[in-house]
Amino acid sequence: MTLTTADIPVEDLRNRSLRWARECYEWAKVPFLPSGERVGRAYDVVGPQNLFGEDSLFINLGYWRDNPATLDEASRDLARLVGREAELGPDDIQLDVGFGYGDQDFLWAKEFGPAHIIGVNIAVEQIEIARKRADELGLSDRIHYEYGSAIALPRPAESCTKVTALESAFHFPSYPRFFAEAHRVLQPGGMLVTADIVPRTNNAAKAMVQLTDRPGVRRMPGAVRDRDFFDIHRYRQALVAAGFTDVTTYSIRRHVYAPLADYLSKRLRDPDMRRVNPALRLAFSRPGLTLWGPWADYIIAKATKPEGIDAASPSPTR
């Protein structure tokens, strides 16, 4: 049977505490790594042992509109929503950018049946685990995983019919560059669909970085300026600027943050959650979500590469 959170070894208090200390030490080093390595390294440090799911390795906040009973089912519902919006089907060659441990791809392969799924990721451990799980599930002939950046996708022009990014694009170094790359690899008529965490407004984004964007304040490595934040409106504008048409963006935040907080307020009291690093438990506790949740939107974006145009897309603005 493929790896799930139920397969994670039980640690005694001493070993668990030592692991937490190592994780915090490794996280503290992440901002000082080269920019292209930070996100992948952060997720490799998190690992399966710090996930909140019950029987999967999904890493997303879930879609709670239909009152799923668990985070695993809410995560599956989010993957299904993306699959429906992307209109996945048996003729599709799908490029999934930022696939986690592969759970969303396994669901899409089973329920939507695309001809082939290529997963791209920069977290080395996630790639290794996802490959092993795909092989155990007998899906390695239909799902292929490889290392690659969202702003330099390792695929030829016009080689895919669908590009998806499920709760991963907010980690990418540049939305315009990712959108341009997605446009490049899509066939005419192909579609990009993202499920993404963004600021509720650009004014909120500016407030979030104000303290580190003032004259005389030294900026930490990896810090971003307000011009790098995209709310739902700027997100749509960037997709249009990249050459996409039929652009649709809408918010599902009311079906994400509040129900997730309700669920985790109970889930975090379960005995198996003792394995999760206290820093992560705090960030996703009700007080933690109350602190950062009001700033955050959660959007679905859908855009089409027009028929009959050149493979090259407009140059990104930065």
Image (spheres, rainbow, N blue to C red):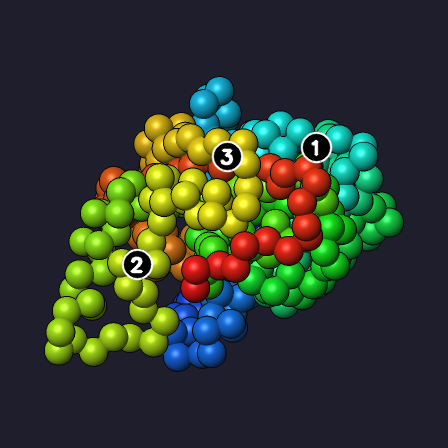
Mark 2 is surrounded, within 10 Å at the Cα level, by few (under 14), some (14 to 19) or many (20 or more) other residues, namely: few
Is mark 3 in CB contact (under 8 Å) with mark 2? no
Is mark 1 in CB contact (under 8 Å) with mark 2? no
238 relative position to 297: left or right: right
Residue 181 lies, in percent from the top left, at: 60, 56
98 relative position to 250: left or right: right
Sequence order check, earlier mark of 3 and 2: 2
Query: Residue type at mark 2?
Result: Arg
Sequence order check, earlier mark of 1 and 3: 1
268 relative position to 8: left or right: left
Q: Quadrant of residue 246?
A: top right
* Helix, strand or loop at mark 2: helix
Residue 90 seen in render: yes
Cα–Cα span, label 1 and label 3: 17 Å
Sequence order check, earlier mark of 1 and 2: 1
Tell me the residue that label 2 is attached to: 227
* Helix, strand or loop at mark 1: loop
Q: Nearer the viewer, residue 32 or 134?
A: 32
Residue at position x 75%, y 31% from top? 89
Query: Residue type at mark 3?
Result: Val
Query: Residue type at mark 1?
Result: Leu
Instruction: Decide: is 303 above or below 47.
Output: above
* Helix, strand or loop at mark 3: strand
Residue 28 lies, in percent from the top left, at: 37, 74
Q: Which mark identifies residue 247?
A: 3
Residue 230 lies, in percent from the top left, at: 36, 49
Cα–Cα span, label 3 and label 2: 22 Å
Residue at position x 27%, y 42% from top? 201
Tell me the residue that label 1 is attached to: 88
Q: Nearer the viewer, residue 170 or 133?
A: 170
Residue at position x 68%, y 50% from top? 310
